[in-house]
Image: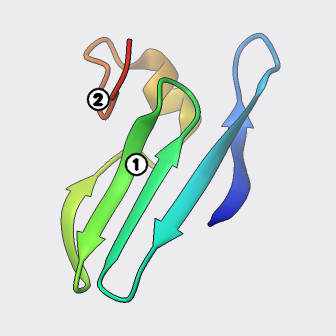
Amino acid sequence: MNRKLFGKTNENQDVYEYEISSKRAKVTLIDYGARITGFSVNGVDIAQGFDSLTAYLEDPYNVGATVG
């Protein structure tokens, strides 16, 4: 598993993106609502998210959210 800083909220809290992968699949998610930011199988994108935290903060539809 890999972790990198994805951005900061308006309250200056760090939000990290995590990548979990195997030989065939890869999923990336952020710890802001456990949102899925990407999912691919055998190199084929199954789900794609936004490129920036700002887009998630401004999103009224909770795209990619898995909890809440």
Q: How many C-alpha atoms fall within 10 Å of the one at disc 2: few (<14), some, or many (≥20)?
A: some
- Disc 2 secondary structure class: loop
- Count up the numbered dots: 2
In the image, residue 2 lies at what x, y percent? 66, 66
Q: Amino acid at mark 2?
A: Val
**Front in this rendered view, residue 27 or 38:** 27
Tell me the quadrant of the picture where the C terminus can be found: top left
Taking the image as shown, residue 15 lies to the left or right of residue 34, namely right
**Front in this rendered view, residue 54 or 5:** 5
- Disc 1 secondary structure class: strand
In the image, residue 29 lies at what x, y percent? 47, 47
Of callouts 1 and 2, the N-terminal one: 1
What residue does disc 2 label? 63
User: In the image, what residue occupies the spot 72% across and 56% down?
Assistant: 4
- Among all residues in the image, which is located at the extreme right? 12
User: In the image, what residue occupies the spot 58% across and 34% down?
Assistant: 31
What residue does disc 1 label? 37
Taking the image as shown, residue 47 lies to the left or right of residue 30, namely left
